Image: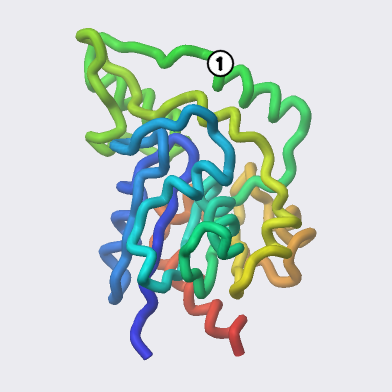
Amino acid sequence: MGHPTLLLLHGLGATAAVWDGVVERWPGDAVAVDLPGHGGAEPLRRYTFGALAAGVEVDPTRRYVVVGHSLGGVLALTLASGWFGLDVEGVVGVGIKVEWTGDDLAKAAALAARPPRAFDTRAEAESWAVKLAGLPGPGADPRSVVRVDGRWRAAFDPRAFAVGAPDAVGLLRAARCPVVLAAGEHDPMSPVDHLAALVDDPVTLPGLGHNAHVEDPGAVLALVDRLDLARS
């Protein structure tokens, strides 16, 4: 049996480029996409998990293992329901934030209501785009910024911050395939003990933070192998 096709879904504010290290290391086919309102993808009129999942445009005739980070992990679980026409044979969710306070939701709503910040230089906009994505270190996907009316801004649509908190319990119940949930040992947004309230065997990724897929692509790829254990 060959390697499954990976469908790679990034987190809020990022682009498909955050998966480059994973794509380079995977021996089979891998497809990384920009989510709606991110990178080169068109924005949505209203951001919901269902609308974002419906905006994932890939070949519907193929079978996928969906690997998602943070928001992308929520969308991976959403696609696993089968309601969106994709044949999903397994899901790996990394760094999914499952516990949301009232303050968390209020801050997200406030960010969604702000107009995009504009900068005089591309470098400033790229630096801001990296911060919005919560990524470590410098370096931005060229598609993460756009020029509008002579000034530069992040391509990310900040209205996506209003997507809200996921119904993680409901999504897991609806999933029609094996699911592996994991988080970095030092991930403040997705502590493994929060994931333990959802699944019996969440995986701790030693020494890693929220962006484990960028920090150590191999560690995230190793999670795909655990789906075979889940199927046995």
Left or right: where 196 falls relative to 53: right
The N terminus appears in which quarter of the rendering? bottom left
Q: Secondary structure at mark 1?
A: helix
Q: Nearer the viewer, residue 116 or 64?
A: 64
Relative to 189, residue 147 above or below: above
Q: Position of residue 223 (x, y in %)?
A: 51, 71
The C terminus appears in which quarter of the rendering? bottom right
What colour-coding does the image apply?
rainbow
Q: Residues within 10 Å of mark 1 (few under 14, many from 20)?
A: some
Residue 210 seen in this snapshot:
no
Residue 58, located in which quarter of the rendered image? bottom left
Q: Nearer the viewer, residue 65 or 209?
A: 65
Q: Residue furthest left?
A: 150
Left or right: where 64 falls relative to 83: left
Residue 108, located in which quarter of the rendered image? top right
Q: Position of residue 19 (x, y in %)?
A: 35, 54
Q: Position of residue 171 (x, y in %)?
A: 68, 57
Give the residue at x 51% y 30%: 160
Residue 88 seen in this snapshot:
yes
Total numbered labels placed on residues in the image: 1
Give the residue at x 26% y 23%: 146
Relative to 33, residue 24 above or below: below
Residue pointed to by mark 1: 113
Give the residue at x 59% y 28%: 162
Q: What's under tag 1, amino acid-wise?
A: Ala
Relative to 115, residue 155 above or below: below
Give the residue at x 46% y 69%: 65
Q: Position of residue 149 (x, y in %)?
A: 23, 8
